[in-house]
Image (tube, rainbow, N blue to C red):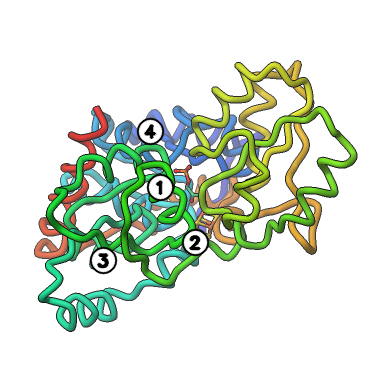
Amino acid sequence: MSAISTSTDIREDILRLKQMRNAVILAHNYQIPEIQDIADYVGDSLGLAFRAQETDADVIVFCGVHFMAETAKIVNPEKTVVLPDAEAGCSLEESCAAADLKAFLEENQEKNYYVITYINSSAAVKALSDVICTSGNAVKIVEAAPKDRPILFAPDQNLGAWVSQETGREMDFWDGNCYLHVEFTRESIQRIKDDYPDAAVVAHPECTTAVRLLADEVCSTEKMVDFCRSSESQNIIVVTEAGMLHRIQKEIPEKNLIAGPTANCACAECRFMKMNTLEKLYNCLSELSPAVELEEEFREAAKAPIMRMLELSK
Ligand code: 13P
Ligand code: SF4
């Protein structure tokens, strides 16, 4: 059963409930504008993980996708962590099942892999990893990896290829990708560049190498805001999920942002990120459901590599 909002403005009801619950609303940069505007903090996966770890609220409302809310619960087991839609998953998470990773590591035991896992993964996969990374700290995490062990980078092969190029460190990649970011093509971005020859291009490292090579800057969603602020270009082509444009435009209204089109669509939206709505946000605060629950054994094992990441990122 879903709760009914009681005033004419659902935003007022959300803020009232938030206060009543002593809750904090964390939102990823890809959330719909209405959710970004009501959140206490909007950021990338790394910033959100830090905020989730530091908060003194009793309830964390995580507006993003499931693995993000799960990460908040892993580092904060005593808190209630809810999310608007428990079905909001991630194609990267889907591309790496814990059983497959476990079997691969067992088959390749003699290699003694140092496993670096992108935060876009399940708690069970994190529990099999040595350290977690995000797009915002992947270079730092790889640079800090032991030099005498081979690296297995999972599950995003594109982020892996970028970080390998940035650090000069060879590594083996898991065969996974983000279904959305691989839809940007060299041709789709080049067409926009032809229309705006003076535009700067900023792209997420989940894009393919062919697309990255067209970019002036490759970075996490949070760093995209800094890039757009400091860029001398008036026109900027933003090659990532379309929600990012709201965050940048709000902070830097004087810049002209152009959404990077995919091969088939002018506006790239992550079907998982876009499952969250204001109504679902209201309902999860009202009912404290869906809430993230984790088996303690998994939670403890997944916490260690996350804490290692947070330590290395300070
Ligand atoms: P960021 O950590 O850069 O925000 O990326 C998260 C994500 O899911 C990108 O698709
Ligand atoms: Fe996952 Fe891609 Fe959506 Fe990011 S954009 S949450 S990587 S499916």
Residue 88 numbered mark, or none? 2
Nearest the eye: 49 or 11: 49
- Give coordinates of residue 292: x percent, y percent: 30, 57
Q: CA–CA distance between discs 1 and 4?
A: 19 Å
Residue behind mark 3? 125
| Residue 85: x %, y % from top left | 48, 59
As drawn, the label of residue 47 is 4
Q: Nearer the viewer, residue 38 or 177?
A: 177
Residue type beneath disc 1: Val
Quarter location, residue 24:
top left
Which comes sooner in the sequence, label 2 or label 4?
A: 4
Gap in Å between the C-alphas at discs 2 and 4?
20 Å
* Label 1 secondary element: helix
The amino acid type, in three-letter code, at marker 3 is: Val
Label 2 vs label 1: CA separation?
27 Å
Disc 2 crowd, CA 10 A, few/some/many (<14, 14-19, 20+):
some
Q: Earlier in the sequence, mark 3 or mark 2?
A: 2
Tag 3–tag 1 contact (CB < 8 Å)? no
Between the residue at mark 3 and the residue at mark 1, the CA separation in whole angstroms equals 20 Å
Q: Are marks 2 and 4 in contact (CB under 8 Å)?
A: no
**Mark 2: secondary structure:** loop
Q: In the depicted view, which residue is nearer to us: 200 or 117?
A: 200
Q: Earlier in the sequence, mark 2 or mark 1?
A: 2
**Which three-letter amino acid code belongs to the residue tagged 2?**
Ala
**Spot occupied by residue 230 in the image (x, y as percentages of width and height):** 60, 16
- Residue 144 visible in the shown view: yes
